Amino acid sequence: MTEKLEGFRFFIRTYGCQMNFHDSGKMALLLQQAGMKEALDDDEADLVILNTCHIREKAKHKVYTELGFLKKKKDKRQRAGKPYFLAVGGCAAQAEGDALLAAAPFVDLVFGTQSYHKLPRMVEELFQKSNVTKQSSCLQNEEPQQFVPSRNSPSLETLKILNIEFPRENKFQFLPNESNAQGSAFLAIQEGCNKFCTYCVVPFTRGGEVSRPAAAILEEARNLAAQGVLEITLLGQNVNAYQGLAPDGTTRWTLARLLKEISTINGIQRLFYTSSHPLNFSEDLIQAHATLPKLMPFLHLPVQSGCNRILKAMNRHHTVEDYKAIIAAARLACPPIALCSDFIVGFPGETEEDFEKTLEFVKSVTYAQAFSFKYSPRPGTVACNMKDQIAEDVKTKRLLTLQDLLRQQQTAFNKSCVGRTSSVLFQRFGKKEGQILGKSEFMQSVVVNVSDPDAWMNTLHTVHIRKATLSCLEGDILE
Ligand code: SF4
C-alpha cells in the first residue's frame, strides 16, 4: 500500500472483449492494493479509467464520446478545487498514443496494454506532479484539494503521462495472482497474436504470442478455487496457441494439458476457453472435449468468412474445409457441443457470390450463437489499403441477412433445450423481483424465479428448461 494513494477513489469503465474485462479486474486489484477504493460510478471517483477497445472504428468513437462527457465533469470538479483525473488504457490507448493526447488534451494519463501493471506507480506520479499530496476523496467534506498547478508547478503539458511501451519484462509476473471475481473468473493464460489477419489490429496493440508458465496459471487457478470460484474461463487472443513452460521447467504444455490439470483442482466445476484459432486446433484439444467432464460443451471458434478466396485475402491461414474438419471432429468427440463463431461481412473485394458462400457455410455448420460485424477498416492494417472497399449500404444489407440466419439458428438451438435439464451458474439478479440470471453449459442466459434471490448467487444448479427465446431460456431449479 502507498500512503500517497490511500483514500482516493477510482472507477474503471471497460469496453470490448473478455481480455479487457480481465485486465480491468487486475487494474482494480492493483489500485486497491495501493490503497485506493473502487467507486460505484464516475461521479464518486477521483480517477476515472477508460479501458478501451480498438477492434472497430465504432469502439474508438465510443471512447471519444465518453471522454467528451467526462471532460464536462472534470471542468466542474476543477472549478470546485477537487481532483478528477482521466486515464485511458487498453488497445485504443496503445494504438493512438500521442494522437489521443492531442485530440483529448484534458486526459491526464494514457497507458497501453503492456504497461498497466505499473498503474499504481503512474497514478502516484500523476498525483505527485499535480500536487495532490494529502489524503482526500471526492466524497469527503474536507477542505478542497488544491491540485490545480500553482505558478511553481509544472506546466499542464508536463503533467501528462504517456506509457505505451512494450516493456521487455512479462507483465504477468507483476500482476496479482488473485481476483475479485465471485462464482466465475477469467484467467489469462496467453496474450497476443502472430497470425496477422489483414483486418486486425491485435498483433499491433497486444504484441506477439506470449504464453504464461503453467505453474503460475495453476497457482492462480488454485487461489480462485480457494476463494470460492466455481467456473474458470481461460483467456487468450489465440488461447489454443498456448505453449507455456511446464512445471518441470523444461518441456511445454498445450492448452489441453493445462485444462486437464486445472480440472483436477477441487472446487473448480466448469471450464471454458476462448478465443481459439483453427490453425492451432490440435487433436489433444478435441480429445479434451471427449474426456474432461468439467470442460463445458461449448466451442468458440471464429471463422470470419465461409469463402476460401476471402479467407485467403484475410490471411486466415485456414480454409473452409479445414474448419469443417475441426467441427466434425469436435462433434464426434463431444456430440452435444454448441458452436459459436465470429463473422465479418463486406471485407474488401467480397462479391455477392462470396457472401452467398458464407450463408451456405453457416447453413451447413449451424451455430448455437455467433458474433457478426461489418468490416471496419483499421489504420495500419493491410486490408485498410486494399482496393475494392465495399460500400456501407452493401455491408449493412449483408450483415442484416447473415444476422437473420444466425438468429434463426440460435433460436432453434435454444428451443431444442426445452424439456431438458441444464447446469446453470447464477450470477445476476433479473429485471423482475424474484428473478435470477445464470449461464448454462452452452453459454445461454437462463432466468428462473426464486423466493430468495440472494441465497442463489454464485451457486451452480440443475435447471429444468421450460421456455426458450432467441436470447434467453426460462426454467425451474430442480433441487
Ligand atoms: S488471429 Fe487474426 S483476428 Fe485473431 S487476434 Fe490474431 S490477427 Fe486478430
Image (spheres, rainbow, N blue to C red):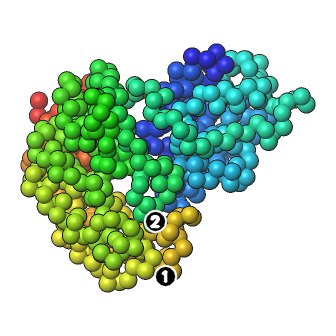
Lateral position of residue 24 relative to residue 87, left or right: left
Determine which of the numbered discs, if any, sits on residue 33 in the image: none
Q: Within the image, what quadrant is residue 165 found in? A: top right
Between residue 420 and residue 453, name the one nearer to us: 420
Q: What is the residue that sits farthest to the right in this orientation? A: 151
* SS at circle 1: loop
Say whether residue 73 is left or right of residue 404: right
Q: Report the amino acid beneath label 1.
A: Asp
Question: Residue 199 has which mark?
Answer: 2
Label 1 crowd bin: few (<14), some (14–19), many (20+), radius 10 Å: few
* For residue 166, above or below residue 125: below
Question: Would you say the beta carbon of the disc 2 residue lies within 8 angstroms of ligand 1?
Answer: yes
* Amino acid marked by disc 2: Tyr
Residue 4 at x, y = what percent? Answer: 67, 19
Q: Earlier in the sequence, mark 2 or mark 1?
A: 2
> Which residue matches tag 1?
388
In the rendered image, the vertical position of residue 142 relative to residue 301, given as above or below? above
**Residue in the image at 18% along x and 59% along y:** 326
Q: Which is nearer the eye, 245 or 135? A: 245
Q: Give the residue displayed 23% in from the left and 32% down from the top.
A: 262
Residue 229 is drawn in which quadrant?
Answer: top left
Question: 229 above or below 384?
Answer: above
Q: Residues within 10 Å of mark 2 (few under 14, many from 20)?
A: many
Do the CB atoms of the residues marked 2 and 1 lie less than 8 Å apart? Answer: no
